[in-house]
Amino acid sequence: MKTDAEFIKQLRKILKYYGELKDFYKKNGKEIKKGRLLFALLLRGIKPGEIKRWCFEMKVRKKDLNIILETYNKWNEVKKNLKNAVKRNSTLYYMVSRIPPELQVIACSWGSVYYKNIKKYLAVLSGLHLEINGETLKDMGYQPSEKFRDVLGKLFEMKLDGKISSREDEIYNLKKLMKVLS
């Protein structure tokens, strides 16, 4: 009986965060489904093989099953990695961007530090992008190569961490990075 009351309390908390955060996911073109969120919670603690069998019997779509399993598999890692405030934006971005939206919402219910990390990712970091791309590099006379990905990745990290803010900053740092990597 006590366990049911705790589960319901936790569920209400998670649904509150779902209601608060679902628009961030829509804005960023990601999908979060209340059904997957509920299944992930209900199936927590059950072995992956049993989850697959149950989902097959209940005719749960393969895409939904995969997200439920990913939530199950990443649960402890997320709990460990986000328990402290993450200082570097690039570190937070790469940690949270790899977590299914359903697990992001669940993580918010684990405490204020988790919530602040997820909220910062959704409100500030998830919408950031570079103003330049591989075409810009080609237009500047660089030959397409593996360096493109490395340089653009480094520039994006710099943008996340607030070291560059404009297209001009991006181009200036791009030239420096291309020289270093030549």
Image (cartoon, rainbow, N blue to C red):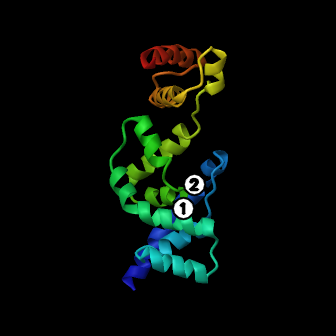
The residue that mark 1 highlights is: 16
Location of residue 165 in the rendering, given as x and y in whole percent from the top left corner? 53, 22
- In the rendered view, tell whether residue 39 sits above or below residue 85: below
Q: Are marks 2 and 1 in contact (CB under 8 Å)?
A: yes
Quadrant position of the N terminus in the picture: bottom left
Task: Please tell me whether mark 1 sits on a helix, a strand or a loop.
Answer: helix
- In the rendered view, tell whether residue 56 sits above or below residue 134: below
- Depth check: give the residue in front, 133 or 80: 133
In the rendered image, which quarter is residue 46 located in?
Answer: bottom left
- In the rendered view, tell whether residue 15 sits above or below residue 171: below
Image-based side of 154 in relation to 24, left or right: left
Image-based side of 105 in relation to 31, left or right: left
| Three-letter amino acid code at the position of disc 1 | Lys
* Label 2 neighbour load within 10 Å: few <14, some 14-19, many 20+: few
Q: CA distance from mark 2 to mark 1?
A: 6 Å
In the rendered image, which quarter is residue 7 located in?
Answer: bottom left
Image-based side of 27 in relation to 149, left or right: right
Q: Which mark is residue 85?
A: none
| Three-letter amino acid code at the position of disc 2 | Glu
Location of residue 138 in the rendering, given as x and y in whole percent from the top left corner? 64, 20
- In the rendered view, tell whether residue 174 sits above or below residue 12: above
Residue 149 appearing in the image: yes
* Residue pictured at 43% horizontal, 79% vertical: 5
Location of residue 159 in the rendering, given as x and y in whole percent from the top left corner? 50, 27
* Residue pictured at 66% horizontal, 17% vertical: 139
- Depth check: give the residue in front, 64 or 23: 64
* Label 1 neighbour load within 10 Å: few <14, some 14-19, many 20+: some
* Residue pictured at 39% horizontal, 35% vertical: 88
The residue that mark 2 highlights is: 20
Task: Please tell me whether mark 2 sits on a helix, a strand or a loop.
Answer: helix
* Residue pictured at 42% horizontal, 60% vertical: 74
Location of residue 59 in the rendering, given as x and y in whole percent from the top left corner? 64, 79
